[in-house]
Amino acid sequence: MTGAAGRVADSTGNWVDTAAPLWLRPYLRLARLDRPIGSWLLLMPCWWSAGLAAIAAGRPYPDPWQCLLFFIGAFVMRGAGCTWNDITDRDLDAMVERTRSRPIPSGQVTVKQALAFLILQALIGLVVLLQFNAFTILLGILSLTTVAIYPFLKRVTHWPQIGLGLAFSWGALMGWPAVFGRLDPAAFILYAGSIAWVIAYDTIYAHQDREDDALIGIKSTAILFSQNTKPMLAVFFSLAVVLIGIAGWLAGAGLIFAIGIAAFALHLAWQVQRLDISDSALCLRLFKSNRDAGLILFAAMILDAAARHLG
């Protein structure tokens, strides 16, 4: 197998294609390390939760060690989740133009090899998780239920994005107890706001496959919302802003956080205004831009914590 032959249709010309050893490339693609945007999006709620916890605890900044652990954990566990998703969806992926060249349906790796790789990633994730307190470890283990269930939702409901939101927002429940050893209303409300954010951005992403999905019976909010996607995105993005803003208020955040949530809201509004659901390339660009929106909000939390500490 050549490097070119093993490429995935919706991700070419990246470092995996050009620099990784040939034998390793299919596994890196299974873990989506050729497309790290999903790992960044999984990471954002973790960092938000850590940022709000720092504000509430009166610390000058989020714990750098914990932020590093969340970074490693997000990339490893997103890889494990994607590997599980590819195992369960291998037959469906073979019927969709964008996904039929993924490692399992294209024959680059077997299901048994993928399962072994999944176990390896899960073990690395466990090592990371064990660095936290007992309550946070328990929450991390509980998150696996949402990861396990998510791939099957698209077969039975037009709202699989809720399942993804539950899984991808779980980090909002992790950063806070990593500091306090418990969950408080601010963390739960941050979690709810993040779920609304995920539903919206994954709807944008799902529009890339809307026609293929409809043909093979896969359900999504992109199909459900169709031409009403923009107003529905506005609803969910607005809900995200309001809930995350309330979480910040409960944590004791101040003016800098308020400016950050306003900038976050403007970025989301720009996505809605810019969206053209018939333009797959644009949908992908807007989806990816949510990393920047998340980093804007996290930066505001860091600055707010520092300002409050100095004040």
Image (cartoon, rainbow, N blue to C red):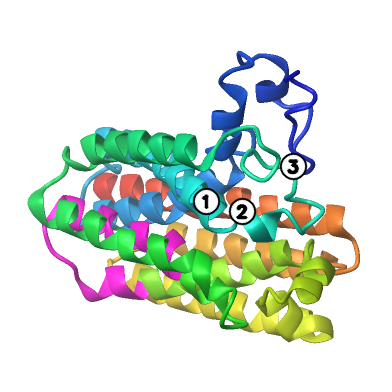
- Local packing at callout 1 (Cα closer than 10 Å; few below 14, some 14-19, many 20+) is many
Residue identified by numbered label 3: 101
Q: Amino acid at mark 1?
A: Ile
Q: Amino acid at mark 3?
A: Ser
Q: Secondary structure at mark 3?
A: loop
Residue 11: x, y in percent?
Answer: 74, 38
Is the C-beta separation of discs 2 and 3 under 8 Å?
Answer: no
Residue 78 versus residue 147 in the image, above or below: above
Could you say which quadrant of the image residue 199 lies in? bottom right
- Left of 20 or right of it: where is 177? left
Q: Residue 48 in magenta?
A: no
- Residue occupying image coordinates x 84% and y 70%: 211
**Secondary structure, magenta segment, majority class:** helix
Residue 156: x, y in percent?
Answer: 56, 82
- Residue occupying image coordinates x 67% and y 66%: 268
Residue 52: x, y in percent?
Answer: 32, 58
Q: Nearer the viewer, residue 54 or 85?
A: 85
Q: Quadrant of the N terminus?
A: top right
Residues in magenta, as a range: 165-189
Residue identified by numbered label 2: 90
Residue identified by numbered label 1: 87
Sequence-wise, the earlier of marks 2 and 3 is: 2
Is the C-beta separation of discs 2 and 1 under 8 Å?
Answer: yes
- Report the Cα–Cα distance between label 2 and label 3: 10 Å
Q: Secondary structure at mark 1?
A: helix
- Residue occupying image coordinates x 24% and y 40%: 126
